[in-house]
Image: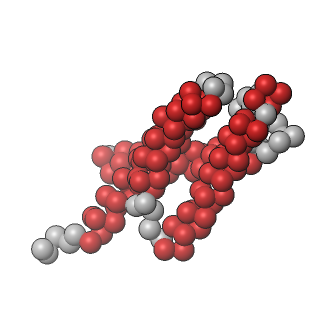
Amino acid sequence: MAYKGIQGIKFLIEINFYISVILLIAGGIFSVPGSNSIFEFNEDLYGALDNNLRMIMIYLAITEMVILVYCFCRKNFQIMTIIGFFLILMIGSMEFYGEINTVEIDENFPLFFLYTGLSHILFGAMASIKKNSIHTSPDQ
């Protein structure tokens, strides 16, 4: 019974991770000017500074895709823990960017980065535990 519970938790963490990846990539792609973005970018008021935020989101989406391809090729997802920490650090970076440049940052950004970051951390930790349990045998 406990084994099924653990398998269920692993499945939920994995599904949650892939949802967060889709959300991260979609958030970046939909930030392209002219698209229906999930974030508010006030171009009329802030101009080029606000477009920098759009570019950050696009680069973030591209980076996520490259890292995922790398992880699938290597069949190793432990790096997602580090990626998650960097995504959470983006909350402070966005706030700092807005403060320095007097650009209003959409209030959805902190929740977005917190959710995607925590999802990546949980998935990376699960991958790390899984890999360590494979390398540890009862004979040792």
Residue 32 screen position, x and y as percent: 79, 45
Asked if 26 appears above or below 76 in the picture, the reply is: above
Residue at coordinates 46% horizontally, 41% vertically from top-left?
89
Q: Quadrant of residue 67?
A: bottom right
Residue 140 screen position, x and y as percent: 12, 74
| Residue closest to the eye, 105 or 137 | 105
Residue 83 screen position, x and y as percent: 47, 53
Q: In this view, does 61 lie to the left or right of 100?
A: right
- Spot the residue most to the right: 34
Asked if 20 appears above or below 138 in the picture, the reply is: above
Residue 7 screen position, x and y as percent: 40, 51
Q: Is residue 134 left or right of residue 45?
A: left
Q: What colour scheme was applied to this rendering of the protein?
A: secondary structure
Q: In which quarter of the image is residue 51?
A: top right
Residue at coordinates 59% horizontally, 67% vertically from top-left?
69
| Residue closest to the eye, 56 or 78 | 56
- Spot the residue most to the left: 140
Residue at coordinates 74% horizontally, 48% vertically from top-left?
29
User: How many marks on residues?
Assistant: 0
Would you say residue 13 is visible in this rendering? no
| Residue closest to the eye, 38 or 33 | 33
Residue at coordinates 79% horizontally, 34% vertically from top-left?
47
Q: Is residue 119 left or right of residue 2?
A: right
Would you say residue 77 is visible in this rendering? yes
